[in-house]
Amino acid sequence: MKTGTIRLLAVAGLVTAGIAGAVAPAQASVFGCATSTVCVYTGTNESGAHQDISGFAGYVDLNSTIHDHANSWINANNTRKMLIGEWRSGSYYVGQVLNAGWYEPNLGSVGFANAADFVDWA
Ligand SMILES: [Ca+2]
């Protein structure tokens, strides 16, 4: 019993280390971000102006308010892994990938503050 508990904690640690800075709440609807929606915010900790994206089929450009001003985001999808990225000298650059139900309170923690241009399926 005790060994099983330690093994479970070790696995959880590995998963967390794989997604730097991100936090997993585990439920589909996350804070004010509705189920099956990706929400991108100008402020850290899901604050400020935001764009809520739902019903899309892959790549979506961020609107002019959020473009190059994103500092936190939520992937409130049930099952789909999502990414946030930007175009760098014409190349597709992935700033961060979030598993379903995870959120990033500070994109600066992964070196991607005020940079994002789009969200897409990962
Ligand atoms: Ca950019």
Image (cartoon, helix red, strand yellow):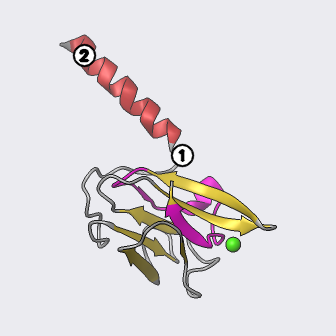
Q: Residue under circle 2? A: 4
Query: Does the magenta run of residues contain 13?
Result: no
Label 1 element class: loop
Is the residue 113 above or below the residue 13 in the image? below
Tell me if 108 is positioned left or right of 44 in this view.
Answer: right
Q: Which mark is residue 20?
A: 1
Task: Judge the density around disc 2: few (<14), some (14-19), many (≥20) Cα neighbours within 10 Å.
Answer: few
User: Which quarter of the picture shows residue 70?
Assistant: bottom right
Q: How far across and down, in percent of the image, does residue 3 sit?
A: 26, 12
Tell me if 94 is positioned left or right of 104 in this view.
Answer: right
Amino acid at circle 1: Ala
Q: Earlier in the sequence, mark 2 or mark 1?
A: 2
What span is in magenta? 99-120
Task: Judge the density around disc 1: few (<14), some (14-19), many (≥20) Cα neighbours within 10 Å.
Answer: some
Ligand 1 in which quarter: bottom right
Amino acid at circle 2: Gly
Q: How far across and down, in percent of the image, does residue 17 sit?
A: 50, 37
User: For the view shown, which residue lies furthest in the front direction?
Assistant: 57
Is the residue 62 above or below the residue 85 in the image? below
Which quadrant does the N terminus fall into? top left
Is the residue 4 above or below the residue 71 in the image? above
Label 2 element class: helix
> Measuring 36% from the left and 49% from the top, which residue is drawn there?
24
> Measuring 25% from the left and 20% from the top, which residue is drawn there?
5
